[in-house]
Structure formats: C-alpha cells, structure tokens
Image (cartoon, rainbow, N blue to C red):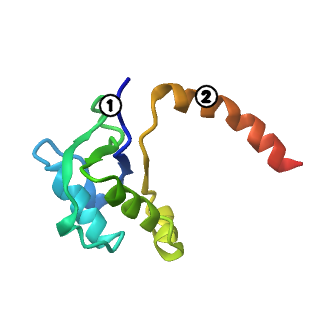
C-alpha cells in the first residue's frame, strides 16, 4: 500500500502557475502558499513535489507535495478553508486537498449521485 498520509494535492490552474517543461514544482507550491494562502513557507519542509498524471496540452496537471511533517500539511490544508481565501481559490479555480488512494476516490465517486439526491429532498 502506498503511504500518502502527508501528501497534499494542489490544483493550480491560474495563469501565473501554468505548467512548463522547465518548472520547479517546489517553488510553485511555496509561492502558492505564500501569495495565495498567505502562509510563510520558509519553515515548511517538502520531501518530494511533482506533477501527477500524463501531460496534456489542454489542461494543467495537479501537483502532489509530500510534506515532511503532517502538521505542516494540515496547516496548509486548513488555511485553504478560511472564508476569504476559500472564495479567492474558488474564483480562480484552484484548490488544495489531501491525496486519497484510488480505491477511496472510486468509492466516494460512486456515492456522489446518492448524496446529490439526498440534498434535493
């Protein structure tokens, strides 16, 4: 089983963070944390940062970052849910979330129509 406890997925599609062949994903994530999430990231240690999925000209791939410390990942994730920042992320079509195993994503996706139906009642 793949350990993804300390991983966060950044969906960054804004023009300032477009995908390029010569990019440094760690710099992109730290810039995102500082400029968008308003977190001073100099004390956050990232073990590994890279894009996931096959390259496509039509869309920007998400970035997965493995945080050295779980508490740092939680601080970043929770900051994305502060009202003013959440609104800005939504407006710019960006997001931060935790990485889940494929099996979990598929199970949650199968339940989505049921939850929408329950909300409509």
Residue in view at x 30 percent, y 45 percent: 63
Query: Toward the viewer: 107 or 61?
Result: 107
Q: CA distance from mark 2 to mark 1?
A: 20 Å
Q: Which mark is first along the chain, 1 or 2? A: 1
**Disc 2 or disc 1, which is closer to the eye?**
2
The reply to whether residue 14 is in sight is no
Image quadrant where residue 48 sits: top left
Look at mark 1 in the image and give the residue it sits on. Answer: 53
Percent x, y for residue 101? 45, 31
Q: Secondary structure at mark 2?
A: helix
Badge 1 crowding class, 10 Å Cα cut-off, few under 14, some 14 to 19, many 20 or more, is few
The residue under the point 17% across, 68% down is 42
Q: Position of residue 14 (x, y in %)?
A: 34, 58
Residue 89 vertical placement versus 40 (above, below): above
Label of residue 107 in the image: 2
Q: Is residue 10 visible?
A: yes
Label 2 crowd (10 A; few <14 / some 14-19 / many >=20): few
- For the residues labelled 2 and 1, say whether their Cβ atoms are less than 8 Å apart: no
Residue 7 disc label: none
Quarter occupied by residue 83: bottom right
Q: Is residue 106 above or below residue 8?
A: above
The reply, left or right, for residue 85 in relation to residue 13 is right
| x, y percent for residue 43 | 19, 67
Residue 66: image location, x then y, percent: 27, 45
Q: Tag 1, which secondary structure?
A: loop
The image shows a total of numbered marks equal to 2
Q: Is residue 52 above or below residue 47?
A: above
- Residue at the image point whose x is 38% and y is 50% from the top: 11
Q: Is residue 119 above or below residue 31?
A: above
């Amino acid at each position: 089983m793949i350990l993804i406890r300390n991983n966060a997925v950044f969906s960054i599609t804004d023009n300032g963070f477009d995908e390029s062949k010569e990019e440094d994903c760690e710099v992109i994530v730290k810039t995102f944390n500082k400029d968008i999430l308003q977190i001073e990231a100099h004390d956050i240690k990232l073990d590994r940062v890279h894009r996931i999925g096959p390259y496509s000209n039509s869309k920007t791939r998400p970035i997965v970052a493995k945080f050295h410390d779980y508490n740092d990942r939680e601080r970043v994730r929770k900051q994305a849910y502060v009202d003013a920042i959440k609104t800005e992320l939504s407006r710019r079509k960006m997001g931060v979330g935790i990485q889940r195993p494929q099996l979990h994503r598929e199970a949650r996706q199968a339940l989505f129509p049921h939850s929408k139906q329950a909300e409509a009642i």
